[in-house]
């Protein structure tokens, strides 16, 4: 089986791939967690540098830099919220509102790492914009577009759980009924817009959803 990953865009300073669900973005701890998107990209592009991450269970657009200068520039752009991101998810239940924000502070749930949780006293501000794409009344599911304004760990997963609509197939957060309704986490990084940086033009990419 080929370990190559689908290339969505390559130029002199940037590489964007489609990361499959189940593959680590970067190495984890231990010899059994060394296979990851970064190492696979380095087979063809040894100079590739990590810019941001996707959860192992999340699929979609993942960006690498080909120079240290571009790595710094892209990392700054993500930190300054100059990168537009849109995810697609399928959640349990019928979401009532068509468009709304989830504004709930998040913190690491230390006794249950790597889980995160809402903490109004000590959590970091976290904002997700939510749009309903479609509702399936028969299946009791809703398809959503999610735009994370902040980029906290597990933000989308915890925010949706907190409003009573866990993402289907979420092995960390979904209760049993929502977990068993999908063979994987139904969360996908589908749209990405990078600003013009270091002579490279602004770039907008779309990665079709697979569920």
Image (tube, helix red, strand yellow):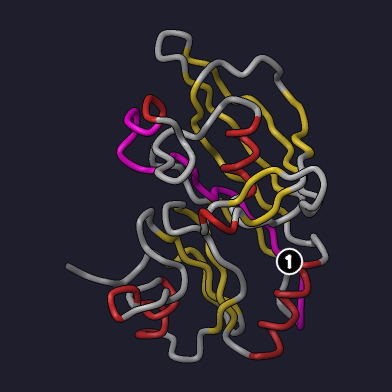
Number of residues whose C-alpha sits closer than 10 Å to that of mark 1, classed few (under 14), some (14–19) or many (20 or more) = some
Query: Considering the numbered disc 1 on the image, is that residue within a helix, a strand or a loop?
Result: helix
Relative to the observer, which residue lies in front, 58 or 145? Answer: 58
- Vertical comparison of 54 with 161: above or below: below
Q: Residue at x 57, y 69 (%)?
A: 63
- Vertical comparison of 35 with 42: above or below: above
Q: Residue at x 45, y 42 (%)?
A: 209
x, y percentage for residue 195?
76, 66
Please give left or right for residue 142 compared with residue 129 in the image.
left
- Vertical comparison of 79 with 175: above or below: below
Q: Residue furthest top?
A: 138
Is 189 inside the magenta-drawn segment? yes
Quadrant containing the N terminus in the rendered view: bottom left
Q: Residue at x 48, y 9 (%)?
A: 137
Residue 72 occupies which quadrant of the picture?
bottom right
Relative to the observer, which residue lies in front, 29 or 47? Answer: 29
Q: Residue at x 54, y 48 (%)?
A: 190
x, y percentage for residue 67?
62, 90
x, y percentage for residue 187?
49, 43
Please give left or right for residue 68 compared with residue 198 in the image.
left
Is 85 inside the magenta-drawn segment? no
Query: Magenta segment range?
Result: 179-198
x, y percentage for residue 135?
53, 16
């Amino acid at each position: 089986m080929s370990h190559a990953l689908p290339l969505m865009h390559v130029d002199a300073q940037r590489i964007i791939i489609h990361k499959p669900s189940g593959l680590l973005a970067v190495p984890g701890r231990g010899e059994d967690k060394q296979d990851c998107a970064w190492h696979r990209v380095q087979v063809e592009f040894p100079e590739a540098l990590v810019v941001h991450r996707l959860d192992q269970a999340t699929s979609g657009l993942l960006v690498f830099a080909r120079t240290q200068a571009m790595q710094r520039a892209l990392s700054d752009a993500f930190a300054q919220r100059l990168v537009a991101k849109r995810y697609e998810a399928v959640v349990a239940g019928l979401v009532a509102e068509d468009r709304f924000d989830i504004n709930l502070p998040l913190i690491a749930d230390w006794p249950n790492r790597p889980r995160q949780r809402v903490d109004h006293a000590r959590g970091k501000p976290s904002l997700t914009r939510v749009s309903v794409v479609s509702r399936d009344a028969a299946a009791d599911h809703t398809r959503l577009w999610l735009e994370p304004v902040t980029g906290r760990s597990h933000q989308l997963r915890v925010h949706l759980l907190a409003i009573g609509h866990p993402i289907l197939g979420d092995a960390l957060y979904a209760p049993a009924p929502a977990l068993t309704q999908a063979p994987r986490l139904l969360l996908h990084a589908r749209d990405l817009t990078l600003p013009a940086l270091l002579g490279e033009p602004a770039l907008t990419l779309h990665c079709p959803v697979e569920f």
